[in-house]
């Protein structure tokens, strides 16, 4: 016995045979405490304050036996301004737009969101990047998963990169649904996250949704339609040069969709359209197809007509074209990708602490080049290849943004001539 009397958190590991292994005990509540509050129905913060005030435990804490009775299932996700596509590096910037989802409040089930930010808040490189924690509770685990996934679908976070899309992918993974959640879950099932990838069926449903959203927006904004009558529109998933699907919206609340392929071989799918409701205040559209509701984030529209959307965590630019516009767009060339092989760029926003090399130095692959500090951590930037450093582009102590050029290599042709 250690004689400790207050709220605390005990951490354990559990193996497949339900054996518990003690890790540590913290003399405070931790970020996960809403899970315990959800399944027990008690307020742990209240209990901590009562004990601290020497009032003892509140009445709801005074139970018979050693275990607090619990019921239902709760799941919590921490939402961070970190980019899982870039190795969880921190991201900074203003949160705009930023819209938190409301709780559905169906029966005992609910969604809870504890956050320390608001729309317009600037995420800086000087503090921990956690934005919020989002918690779902329901009588069953499957229901809790569905509520949390739906909450993330309605959680609009723009201005910074974040991990909410990765969490969404985890929640919808079959192994997670089946309860197969060891600590090796991510290395096993999502070893390199490159964004949420939709299935072909989901892409078809997204294309129909975008056609419906585009038509509704045109009506609200009093814009002319892309096509007239039942004429199909072409939806490009990924912008001007993205995947093309032909969508026809019919008067009898049906839609037809087919993928446009090079060889002309495609299958048309009929989809029942139940509803399409715009919620511009929360940057959302609520679309029901074939009896299934989904919340789609409608973020912004560019000058070229491309609309940024997100469904099930998959975010992309989308474009609605007439068949003639699509035909003409096939003659356009995709923009060339800039060659950055001779540049060393900052992987994150932060401050350049020091250089480990000087102009004219020869470096090897993986050699330390400089140190960038962000979110109270110092990160080593290493050489992406062997070569000579021609120029340092920033000064020590300078504030950096993501992808800012730190130094340049000697162009390989020039290096060969010098040799």
Image (spheres, rainbow, N blue to C red):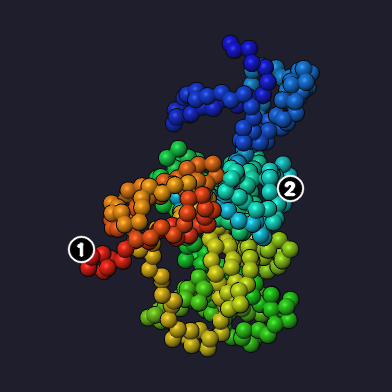
Image location (x, y in percent) of residue 346: 46, 55
Name the one closer to the observer, 12 or 31: 31
Image location (x, y in percent) of residue 105: 73, 47
Disc 2 element = loop
Instruction: Say above or below: 16 vs 419.
Output: above
Residue 332 position by quadrant: bottom left
Disc marking residue 419:
1
Residue 229 position by quadrant: bottom right
Image location (x, y in percent) of residue 167: 54, 49
Crowd around label 1: few <14 · some 14–19 · many ≥20 (10 Å): few
Which residue is painted at 26% across and 64% down in the image?
Answer: 415
Instruction: Say above or below: 100 vs 55.
Output: below
Pick out the residue farthest to the left. Answer: 419
Name the one closer to the observer, 126 or 43: 126
Image location (x, y in percent) of residue 220: 74, 76
Quarter of the rendering occupied by the C terminus: bottom left
Which residue is painted at 68% across and 63% down in the image?
Answer: 283
Q: Earlier in the sequence, mark 1 or mark 2?
A: 2
Which residue is painted at 50% across and 23% down in the image?
Answer: 22
Q: Which residue is mark 2?
A: 105
Name the one closer to the observer, 72 or 220: 220
């Amino acid at each position: 016995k250690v004689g400790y009397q207050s709220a605390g958190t005990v951490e354990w590991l559990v193996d497949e045979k339900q054996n518990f292994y003690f890790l540590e005990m913290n003399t405070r509540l931790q970020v996960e405490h809403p899970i315990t509050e959800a399944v027990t129905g008690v307020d742990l913060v209240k209990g901590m304050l009562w004990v601290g005030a020497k009032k003892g435990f509140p009445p709801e804490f005074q139970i018979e036996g050693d275990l607090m009775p619990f019921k239902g299932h709760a799941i919590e996700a921490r939402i961070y301004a970190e980019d899982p596509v870039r190795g969880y590096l921190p991201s900074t910037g203003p949160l705009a737009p930023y819209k938190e989802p409301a709780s559905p409040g169906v029966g005992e089930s609910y969604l809870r969101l504890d956050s320390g930010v608001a729309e317009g808040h600037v995420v800086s490189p000087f503090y921990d990047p956690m934005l919020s924690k989002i918690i779902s509770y329901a009588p069953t685990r499957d229901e809790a998963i569905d509520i949390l996934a739906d909450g993330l679908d309605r959680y609009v976070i723009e201005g910074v990169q974040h991990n909410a899309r990765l969490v969404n992918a985890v929640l919808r993974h079959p192994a997670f649904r089946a309860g197969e959640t060891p600590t090796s879950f991510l290395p096993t099932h999502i070893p390199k996250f490159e964004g949420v990838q939709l299935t072909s069926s989901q892409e078809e449903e997204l294309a129909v949704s975008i056609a419906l959203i585009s038509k509704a927006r045109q009506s609200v904004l009093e814009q002319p339609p892309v096509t007239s009558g039942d004429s199909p529109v072409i939806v490009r998933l990924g912008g001007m040069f993205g995947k093309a699907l032909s969508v026809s919206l019919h008067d009898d609340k049906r839609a037809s969709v087919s993928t446009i392929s090079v060889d002309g071989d495609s299958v048309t799918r009929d989809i029942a359209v139940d509803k399409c409701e715009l919620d511009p205040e929360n940057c959302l559209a609520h679309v029901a197809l074939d009896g299934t509701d989904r919340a789609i984030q409608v973020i912004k529209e560019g000058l070229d007509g491309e609309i940024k959307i997100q469904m099930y965590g998959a975010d992309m630019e989308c474009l609605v074209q007439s068949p003639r516009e699509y035909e003409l767009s096939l003659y356009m060339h995709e923009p060339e990708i800039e060659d950055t092989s001779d540049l060393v760029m900052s992987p994150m926003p932060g401050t350049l602490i020091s250089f480990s090399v000087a102009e004219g130095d020869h470096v090897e692959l993986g050699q330390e080049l400089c140190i960038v500090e962000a979110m109270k951590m110092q990160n080593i930037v290493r050489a992406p290849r062997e070569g000579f450093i021609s120029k340092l582009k920033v000064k020590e102590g300078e504030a950096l943004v993501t992808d800012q050029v730190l130094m340049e290599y000697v162009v390989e042709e020039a290096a060969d001539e010098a040799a």
